[in-house]
Image (spheres, rainbow, N blue to C red):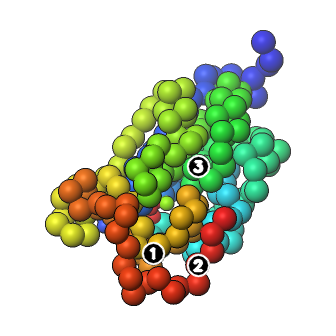
C-alpha cells in the first residue's frame, strides 16, 4: 500500500441535487468550516464554468471563495498540494475520471467534498455523480424550491431549446422545478434566440 500524505483516514462527501438547490452554498460552508479549523483547503472547479467568475467558486446567492479552475479531473491531483481538504464544484463537468481522482485523494487521507448535478435537464443521472454516490462515505441531497408552485424541487428545467447535454447557464437558462411542473420537452419560446455557449 502507498504511504498516505496524512496519518488519519480520508473520506468522500457528495452534495448533489438540481440547479439552485444550494450545492455550492453547502460546499462553500464546509470549506469555510475547515478553514476555521486551520485546515488547508484547495477548491477546484472545471475551467468551462465562467458564469460568475474565472477563478472563484460562486453560488447563485453570490457567496464565493477563490478556486483553481482546471480542465480535467487529473489536474486536481497536480494542484492540490498539501491541502487536507479538497473541494470540487460542478463535478458533472469532469466526467468519469473524477471517481478515480476522488478515491485517490481520500485514500491519501484527505477530506474530499464534491458538489454536482445528479440529473441532467432530461432527468438522466449525470455521470460521474452516480458512481461517486456509490463510493462516498457521506451523501447529501439538496432540494430547491419549485418556481411554479413552491414545492421542494429536484429537477432542472431548461428554459431554452438546445439539445446538448451541457449548456452553461444560470437563471436565464434554467429554473428549479418539482416533478409535477418539470417537463424536459417544454421551453420558453421567448428565449429561443439567446446566444448561449454549448460544450
Ligand atoms: P446550486 O449550486 O445548487 O446551483 P447555489 O448554492 O449556487 O445552488 O445557490 C443557491 C441559492 O440560489 C439559494 O440560496 C437562493 O438564493 C438561490 N435560488 C434561486 N432560485 C432558487 C430556487 N428556485 N430555489 C432555491 N433557491 C434558489
Ligand atoms: Mg453550484
Measured from the top left, where is residue 70 in percent x and y?
75, 56
**Quarter of the view holding residue 132:** top right
Q: Nearer the viewer, residue 53 or 195?
A: 195
- Kindly identify which numbered label has been placed on residue 196: 2
Compared with residue 29, is residue 65 higher up or lower down, i.e. above or below? below
The quarter of the rendering in which ligand 1 is drawn is bottom left
- Kindly identify which numbered label has been placed on residue 150: none
User: Decide: marks 2, 1 in contact (CB < 8 A)?
Assistant: yes
Q: Nearer the viewer, residue 38 or 59?
A: 59
Q: Nearer the viewer, residue 107 or 94?
A: 94
**Quarter of the view holding residue 5:** top right
The C terminus sits in image quarter: bottom right
Q: Residue furthest top?
A: 1
Q: Earlier in the sequence, mark 1 or mark 3?
A: 3
Q: Marks 1 and 3, how far apart in space?
A: 23 Å
Q: Nearer the viewer, residue 127 or 60?
A: 127
Q: Marks 2 and 1, how far apart in space?
A: 9 Å
Q: Secondary structure at mark 1?
A: loop
Compared with residue 147, is residue 166 higher up or lower down, i.e. above or below? above
Residue bearing the label numbered 1: 160
Seen at 67% across and 58% down, the residue is 46
Number of marks drawn: 3
Amino acid at each position: 500500500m502507498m504511504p498516505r500524505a496524512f496519518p488519519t483516514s480520508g473520506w468522500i462527501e457528495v452534495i448533489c441535487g438540481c440547479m439552485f438547490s444550494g450545492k455550492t452554498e453547502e460546499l462553500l460552508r464546509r470549506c469555510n468550516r475547515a478553514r476555521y479549523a486551520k485546515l488547508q483547503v484547495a477548491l477546484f472547479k472545471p475551467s468551462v464554468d465562467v458564469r460568475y467568475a474565472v477563478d472563484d467558486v460562486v453560488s447563485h446567492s453570490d457567496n464565493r471563495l477563490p478556486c483553481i479552475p482546471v480542465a480535467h479531473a487529473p489536474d486536481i491531483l497536480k494542484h492540490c498540494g498539501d491541502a487536507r481538504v479538497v473541494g470540487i464544484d460542478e463535478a458533472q463537468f469532469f466526467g468519469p475520471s473524477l471517481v478515480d481522482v476522488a478515491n485517490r485523494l481520500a485514500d491519501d487521507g484527505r477530506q474530499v467534498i464534491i458538489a454536482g448535478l445528479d440529473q441532467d435537464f432530461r432527468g438522466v443521472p449525470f455521470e460521474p455523480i452516480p458512481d461517486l454516490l456509490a463510493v462516498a462515505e457521506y451523501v447529501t441531497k439538496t432540494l430547491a424550491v419549485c418556481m411554479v408552485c413552491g414545492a421542494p424541487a429536484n429537477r432542472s428545467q431548461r428554459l431554452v431549446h438546445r439539445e446538448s447535454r451541457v449548456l452553461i447557464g444560470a437563471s436565464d437558462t434554467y429554473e428549479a422545478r418539482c416533478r409535477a411542473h418539470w417537463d424536459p420537452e417544454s421551453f420558453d419560446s421567448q428565449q429561443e434566440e439567446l446566444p448561449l455557449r454549448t460544450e
